Structure formats: C-alpha cells, structure tokens
Image (cartoon, rainbow, N blue to C red):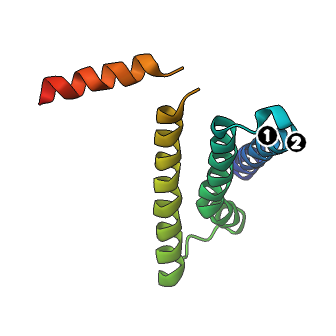
Amino acid sequence: MIFGLFLSMYLITVLGNLLIILAVSSDSHLHIPMYFSLSNLSFVDICFTSTTVPKMIVDILTQSRVISYVGCLTQMSLLIIFGCMDDMLLTVMAYDSLRNRDIKDALRKLHRRKV
C-alpha cells in the first residue's frame, strides 16, 4: 500500500511538471522570462524528486534499506545541488516580475532599517 502511494505521488509530480514544461514550450505567448523560469523550475523539481524517490520506491518494494557509500554521496550531492537550484530559481522568479514593485519597495525599506 505504501509502495502504491509513493509511486502515485511520484508519477503525479513528474507528469504535472512535464505538463507545465509542455504548456510553456508549446504556447508562444508564454515565451517570457517568468514562464521560462517556471519551466526551468519544473525541470529542477523533476530532478530533485527523482534524486531520492525512485530509490525509496525500490527499497519499499524489495524491503531492503541498503545503500552504498558512493550511492549515498551521489544522492546527497544531487539533492543539495537541485535544492540550491530550486532556491535560486525561486529567488530569480520573485525578483524578476512582470508587478512585484510592492515587494521590492518593502525589501528596500527593510534594508534601510537595518542600515
């Protein structure tokens, strides 16, 4: 039952992100920086999710909890890399926009208070 739950969540995540990438790439009206960043965020989300979940699904199916040292280092390195990429893309997306003047003004006021 846990196997089916995690497999369905993984497939929904991957398919949802692929749909976002497909929608952005197929519609020429969405070829602006914000949607380009959104499609990149979807790709990084697929990579981030694919770093750990498939191994976990296999472990649940085989009832094995063994991972090699190299496999662990690889998995942790990819998790950190894709996590940082995710954070950077979200930061760029927040700063980029198409109507975020209020947020930019609030950040400037906050920065002035600290200085």
Residue 54 percent location from the top left of the image: 68, 62
Q: Is residue 112 left or right of residue 80?
A: left
Q: Secondary structure at mark 2?
A: helix
Tell me if residue 91 comes above or below residue 43 in the rendering: above
Q: Crowding at label 1, few (<14), some or many (≥20) Cα neighbours within 10 Å? A: some
Q: CA distance from mark 1 to mark 2?
A: 6 Å
27 and 77: which one is in front? Answer: 27
Q: Is residue 23 left or right of residue 5?
A: right
Identify residue type, mark 2.
Ser
The residue at which mark 2 appears reads as: 26
Residue at 54%, 78% (x, y): give it: 71
Tell me if residue 74 comes above or below residue 26 in the rendering: below
Q: Is residue 113 left or right of residue 24?
A: left
- Are the two marked residues, 1 and 2, in contact with CB atoms closer than 8 angstroms? yes
User: Which residue lies most toward the top here?
Assistant: 102
Residue 61 percent location from the top left of the image: 72, 63
Residue at 70%, 37% (x, y): give it: 32
1 and 69: which one is in front? Answer: 69
Q: Quadrant of the C terminus?
A: top left
Q: Secondary structure at mark 1?
A: helix
Residue 1 percent location from the top left of the image: 74, 47
The residue at which mark 1 appears reads as: 24
